[in-house]
Image (spheres, rainbow, N blue to C red):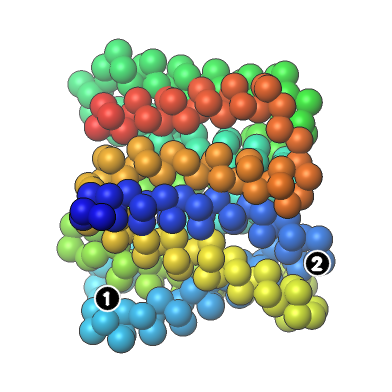
Amino acid sequence: MDDRSVGIVLVLVSAAGFGTLGVFGVLAAEEGVPIPTVLFFRFVLATVILWAILGLRGRFRPLTGRSLAIALGLGGLGYTTMSGLYFLGLEFLTAGLVAIVLYTYPAFVVCLVVARHPERITSAVVAALALSITGVGLITGADPAGADPRGVAIVLGAALAYALYIVTSQQALRTVDPETLSAFVFPAAAGSFLVIGAGTGTLEAPGGPTAWAVVFAIAVVATVIPMLAFFAGISRVGASRASIVSAAEPAVTVALGAALLGEPVTAVTAAGGGLVVTGVILIEREGA
């Protein structure tokens, strides 16, 4: 395969990996592992693995000063909020619906950018936002597959938190590569969930081999591998094309949820999800 094809495959691997997160989250809940415990171990394990990989590649470097402060803030506040709300949303919605609703985050990114730069509003951006909003509205108002409005609101909060994380991280990414930034975001998020878990009495060792296997899979299959694959893909096909290809992520979650968890997939789910993904693709093509 040529370099471009390899890049597309890597981004698809990334989308598939990230697409497993909701399914593993449901499995963790079924094993009785509290959310703070899941996320604490997710980010601790991801930190250890990522630091080891960067060290072996000779690419690990410590952050200092402003870059370190931004990374710790992004992890301790931004990524913590997004991850916590995502997993909380799984208590109200199917994994597939959580993935679809979370995928509105590019629309929030556009809104945040347009708020600072009104001149970037175009007809394509408006159409993309309308499609995303219509898709979520369709799922919330007409989907019998478990679209609890409370869950939709929670996951929209996760999407907004992720959008804020993306916009804020651009400041650090001017001088720090994405992998190094993640290497410091992850431990900061782990620290936050350590405090949350200890403060709420929900921090405990996973109770058994299956629970540990699920937590390990969340850290490796749904976090480190897709992150590294996405960055490797971007280097070959560019950010815009990679973002469009990664639109496969919600479809992966919906398919896995149906196959492994028996989650229903209705025509409304498919239509609403299709509108959201189409909106995202329009946004990425517009380069907003």
Describe residue 132's horizontal placement relative to residue 32 as left or right: left
Residue 200 in which image quadrant: bottom right
Q: Amino acid at mark 1?
A: Leu
Q: Which residue is mark 1?
A: 63
Q: Which residue is mark 2?
A: 31
**Lower position in the chain sequence, tag 1 or tag 2:** 2
Residue 62 image point, x, y percent: 27, 80
The quadrant of the image that shows the C terminus is top left
* Residue 279 vertical position relative to residue 62 in the rendered view, above or below: above
Neighbourhood count class around disc 1 (C-alpha, 10 Å): few under 14, some 14–19, many 20 upward: some
Neighbourhood count class around disc 2 (C-alpha, 10 Å): few under 14, some 14–19, many 20 upward: some
Secondary element at image label 2 = loop
* Residue 211 vertical position relative to residue 97 in the rendered view, above or below: below
Q: Nearer the viewer, residue 2 or 276?
A: 2
The answer to whether residue 192 shows anywhere in this view is no
Residue 287 in which image quadrant: top left
Instruction: Give me the disc on residue 121.
Output: none
Residue 27 image point, x, y percent: 74, 60
- Disc 1 to disc 2, C-alpha distance: 37 Å
Q: Nearer the viewer, residue 152 or 96?
A: 96
Q: Amino acid at mark 2?
A: Glu
